[in-house]
Amino acid sequence: QVRLVESGGGSVQPGGSLRLSCAASPYAIRSFYLGWFRQGPGKEREGVASITRDGTTTYATSVEGRFSVSKDYAKNTLYLEMNSVVPEDTGMYYCATLNADRRLRDPLDPRPYNLWGQGTQVTVSS
């Protein structure tokens, strides 16, 4: 059974940091792709970061150098370390995977992902 449960969201001031966690089933954490996505107020869902089974990472331009994605097989957990946050980082953050081993043209495109968590809210405000 595939399970994804996000946690770690909250309110943070601009320039601050947060670490999001996604507790996954042993099957899900070993998926070919795992991704973090977000949806801000009035915006479409967008890709933030992804990591492949072999550890290759991809970041959205808007977060590169500030966010870091990682995973821990021992804890079956996916992480998103968020640093130097800005108000534009506000949104509901989701982790997701897809139950197929195939190469994605764009690992940050949410459309191929078919397994999603319920999300955790991040609010950046002074």
Image (cartoon, grey):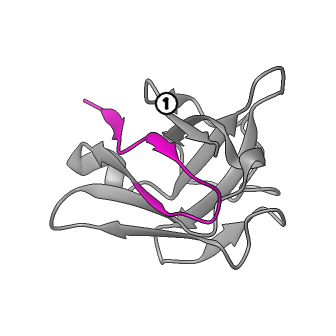
In what element is the residue under mark 1?
Answer: strand
Question: Is 61 part of what is drawn in magenta?
Answer: no
Q: Quadrant of residue 23?
A: top left
Say which residue appears at 82% left-offset and 27% top-offset.
44
Q: Quadrant of residue 46?
A: top right
Say which residue appears at 80% left-offset and 56% top-offset.
106
Closer to us: 94 or 51: 94
Please identify the residue farthest to the front as the structure is shown.
126
Residue extent of the magenta highlight: 1-19
Closer to us: 59 or 92: 92
Say which residue appears at 24% left-offset and 66% top-offset.
73
In-image side of 60 versus 5 (left or right): right
**Spot occupied by residue 67 in the image (x, y as percentages of width and height):** 60, 68
The image shows residue 50, relative to residue 24, as above or below, that is below
Q: Amino acid at mark 1?
A: Leu
In-image side of 112 versus 26 (left or right): right
- What residue sits right under mark 1 in the picture? 115
Question: Is 15 part of what is drawn in magenta?
Answer: yes
